[in-house]
Amino acid sequence: MNPSIRSFESPGLFHFSLVVMALSFLLWILLRSISSIIDDAYETQVRATAMSLQRAVLGAREQWFVQGKPGVIPPPPHGPYALLMSAAGWPLDALAGDHNSAGAESLSRCQRLWQALLPDQTLTLQGQDIPQAESRDGQCIYRFPGVGDQGKNAEIEYTPSRGRINYFIR
Protein backbone atom coordinates (compact mmCIF):
# COMPACT_ATOMS: atom_id res chain seq x y z
CA MET A 1 0.00 0.00 0.00
CA ASN A 2 1.24 3.40 -0.90
CA PRO A 3 1.92 5.56 2.22
CA SER A 4 0.80 8.77 0.49
CA ILE A 5 -2.71 7.41 0.04
CA ARG A 6 -4.78 7.50 3.18
CA SER A 7 -7.96 5.67 3.68
CA PHE A 8 -10.96 7.50 5.02
CA GLU A 9 -13.53 5.74 7.13
CA SER A 10 -17.03 7.11 7.36
CA PRO A 11 -18.13 8.17 10.82
CA GLY A 12 -20.02 5.51 12.64
CA LEU A 13 -23.17 5.54 14.64
CA PHE A 14 -21.21 6.38 17.80
CA HIS A 15 -19.84 9.61 16.30
CA PHE A 16 -23.27 10.55 15.04
CA SER A 17 -24.82 10.05 18.48
CA LEU A 18 -22.08 12.17 20.07
CA VAL A 19 -22.88 15.01 17.68
CA VAL A 20 -26.61 14.71 18.39
CA MET A 21 -25.97 14.75 22.16
CA ALA A 22 -23.70 17.80 21.87
CA LEU A 23 -26.29 19.68 19.79
CA SER A 24 -29.03 18.71 22.24
CA PHE A 25 -26.98 20.05 25.14
CA LEU A 26 -26.34 23.33 23.31
CA LEU A 27 -30.03 23.64 22.50
CA TRP A 28 -30.92 23.07 26.17
CA ILE A 29 -28.50 25.84 27.22
CA LEU A 30 -30.00 28.17 24.59
CA LEU A 31 -33.57 27.52 25.76
CA ARG A 32 -32.62 28.19 29.39
CA SER A 33 -30.96 31.45 28.36
CA ILE A 34 -34.01 32.56 26.39
CA SER A 35 -36.28 31.76 29.34
CA SER A 36 -34.03 33.81 31.63
CA ILE A 37 -34.09 36.71 29.17
CA ILE A 38 -37.90 36.59 29.02
CA ASP A 39 -38.12 36.64 32.83
CA ASP A 40 -35.71 39.59 33.00
CA ALA A 41 -37.67 41.47 30.33
CA TYR A 42 -40.91 40.91 32.25
CA GLU A 43 -39.40 42.21 35.48
CA THR A 44 -38.01 45.23 33.65
CA GLN A 45 -41.41 45.93 32.11
CA VAL A 46 -43.05 45.74 35.56
CA ARG A 47 -40.52 48.23 36.95
CA ALA A 48 -40.96 50.55 33.96
CA THR A 49 -44.76 50.46 34.29
CA ALA A 50 -44.54 51.20 38.03
CA MET A 51 -42.19 54.11 37.31
CA SER A 52 -44.57 55.43 34.64
CA LEU A 53 -47.42 55.31 37.12
CA GLN A 54 -45.25 57.12 39.70
CA ARG A 55 -44.36 59.77 37.12
CA ALA A 56 -48.05 60.25 36.29
CA VAL A 57 -49.01 60.56 39.97
CA LEU A 58 -46.27 63.13 40.55
CA GLY A 59 -47.31 64.98 37.39
CA ALA A 60 -50.89 65.16 38.66
CA ARG A 61 -49.65 66.48 42.01
CA GLU A 62 -47.59 69.10 40.22
CA GLN A 63 -50.69 70.20 38.29
CA TRP A 64 -52.59 70.34 41.57
CA PHE A 65 -49.99 72.75 43.02
CA VAL A 66 -49.80 74.88 39.86
CA GLN A 67 -53.57 75.21 39.61
CA GLY A 68 -53.91 76.37 43.22
CA LYS A 69 -54.74 73.04 44.92
CA PRO A 70 -58.21 72.48 43.46
CA GLY A 71 -60.32 69.47 44.43
CA VAL A 72 -60.53 68.35 40.80
CA ILE A 73 -57.93 68.65 38.05
CA PRO A 74 -59.55 68.97 34.61
CA PRO A 75 -58.81 66.25 32.06
CA PRO A 76 -55.95 66.73 29.61
CA PRO A 77 -56.92 67.81 26.06
CA HIS A 78 -57.32 64.24 24.80
CA GLY A 79 -58.05 62.53 28.11
CA PRO A 80 -61.46 61.25 29.14
CA TYR A 81 -61.05 61.69 32.88
CA ALA A 82 -60.56 64.52 35.33
CA LEU A 83 -58.76 63.63 38.56
CA LEU A 84 -60.34 63.96 41.99
CA MET A 85 -57.49 65.01 44.30
CA SER A 86 -57.03 64.52 48.03
CA ALA A 87 -56.36 67.42 50.39
CA ALA A 88 -52.70 66.37 50.33
CA GLY A 89 -52.63 66.52 46.52
CA TRP A 90 -52.73 62.86 45.48
CA PRO A 91 -55.13 61.41 42.88
CA LEU A 92 -58.05 59.63 44.58
CA ASP A 93 -60.40 58.87 41.69
CA ALA A 94 -60.97 59.65 38.05
CA LEU A 95 -64.13 61.48 37.06
CA ALA A 96 -65.88 61.64 33.72
CA GLY A 97 -65.05 64.69 31.61
CA ASP A 98 -68.08 66.59 32.92
CA HIS A 99 -66.73 66.17 36.48
CA ASN A 100 -69.65 63.99 37.52
CA SER A 101 -68.98 60.99 39.69
CA ALA A 102 -67.80 58.16 37.53
CA GLY A 103 -69.13 55.59 39.99
CA ALA A 104 -71.93 54.61 37.61
CA GLU A 105 -69.43 53.38 35.06
CA SER A 106 -68.55 49.74 34.75
CA LEU A 107 -64.94 50.36 35.82
CA SER A 108 -63.80 50.35 39.43
CA ARG A 109 -62.13 53.37 41.02
CA CYS A 110 -58.73 51.75 40.63
CA GLN A 111 -59.33 50.92 36.97
CA ARG A 112 -60.46 54.50 36.29
CA LEU A 113 -57.32 55.82 37.99
CA TRP A 114 -55.15 53.51 35.86
CA GLN A 115 -56.81 54.73 32.66
CA ALA A 116 -56.62 58.36 33.71
CA LEU A 117 -52.99 58.24 34.80
CA LEU A 118 -51.69 55.90 32.08
CA PRO A 119 -53.76 56.59 28.97
CA ASP A 120 -50.95 55.35 26.71
CA GLN A 121 -51.77 51.67 26.38
CA THR A 122 -48.21 50.77 25.30
CA LEU A 123 -47.16 51.06 28.93
CA THR A 124 -49.32 48.19 30.09
CA LEU A 125 -48.02 44.68 30.58
CA GLN A 126 -48.66 41.86 28.13
CA GLY A 127 -51.03 43.89 26.00
CA GLN A 128 -53.65 44.28 28.70
CA ASP A 129 -55.41 47.63 28.49
CA ILE A 130 -56.44 47.56 32.13
CA PRO A 131 -54.86 45.15 34.57
CA GLN A 132 -56.83 43.22 37.14
CA ALA A 133 -57.48 45.84 39.79
CA GLU A 134 -58.84 45.71 43.30
CA SER A 135 -59.10 48.10 46.19
CA ARG A 136 -57.77 46.81 49.50
CA ASP A 137 -57.32 48.90 52.64
CA GLY A 138 -57.56 52.09 50.59
CA GLN A 139 -54.86 50.93 48.16
CA CYS A 140 -55.24 50.13 44.49
CA ILE A 141 -53.67 46.78 43.68
CA TYR A 142 -52.98 46.10 40.00
CA ARG A 143 -52.24 42.47 39.16
CA PHE A 144 -50.57 41.07 36.09
CA PRO A 145 -50.41 37.35 35.27
CA GLY A 146 -47.05 35.63 35.34
CA VAL A 147 -44.82 34.68 32.47
CA GLY A 148 -41.75 32.56 32.04
CA ASP A 149 -40.73 29.27 33.59
CA GLN A 150 -41.47 30.29 37.16
CA GLY A 151 -44.79 31.97 36.30
CA LYS A 152 -44.00 35.01 38.42
CA ASN A 153 -46.95 37.29 39.04
CA ALA A 154 -46.55 41.03 39.34
CA GLU A 155 -48.43 43.52 41.48
CA ILE A 156 -48.24 47.29 41.44
CA GLU A 157 -49.72 49.02 44.49
CA TYR A 158 -50.82 52.65 44.62
CA THR A 159 -51.61 54.26 47.96
CA PRO A 160 -53.70 57.40 47.27
CA SER A 161 -53.33 58.78 50.80
CA ARG A 162 -49.55 59.13 50.34
CA GLY A 163 -49.06 58.88 46.58
CA ARG A 164 -46.80 55.90 47.08
CA ILE A 165 -46.16 53.29 44.37
CA ASN A 166 -44.75 49.85 45.17
CA TYR A 167 -44.28 46.89 42.88
CA PHE A 168 -43.77 43.24 43.65
CA ILE A 169 -42.80 40.29 41.49
CA ARG A 170 -43.59 36.98 43.14
Image (spheres, rainbow, N blue to C red):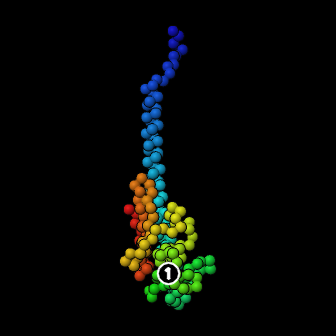
Q: Residue at x 45, y 51 (%)?
A: 35
Note whether 150 is above or below 3 in the view shown. below
Give the image location of residue 139, x and y in percent: 40, 76
Asked whether 34 or 93 is in front, the reply is 93
Q: Amino acid at mark 1?
A: Gly
Where is residue 42 shown, x and y percent of the image?
47, 60
* Vertical placement of residue 125 versus 5, above or below: below
User: Does residue 95 appear to the left or right of 159 in the view shown?
Assistant: right
Instruction: Tell me if residue 139 comes above or below residue 169 in the rendering.
Output: below
Q: Residue furthest right?
A: 77
Name the quadrant containing residue 17. top left
Q: Please report the residue visible at 51 percent of the width from the left and 12 percent of the height from the top.
A: 3
Q: Is residue 123 above or below residue 87?
A: above
**Quadrant that contains the C terminus:** bottom left
Q: Which residue is mark 1?
A: 103
Please report the residue visible at 43 percent of the width from the left and 26 percent of the height from the top. Answer: 14
Disc 1 is placed on an element classified as helix
Please tell me in which quadrant of the rendered image residue 138 appears: bottom left
Dot 1: few (<14), some (14–19), or many (≥20) neighbours within 10 Å?
Answer: some
Q: Nearer the viewer, residue 7 or 16?
A: 16
The location of residue 140, given as percent across then percent down, is 43, 74
Q: Residue at x 56, y 72 (%)?
A: 119
Q: Position of residue 150 (x, y in %)?
A: 40, 55
Q: Is residue 135 visible?
A: yes
Kindly give the residue lying farthest to the top in the view shown.
1
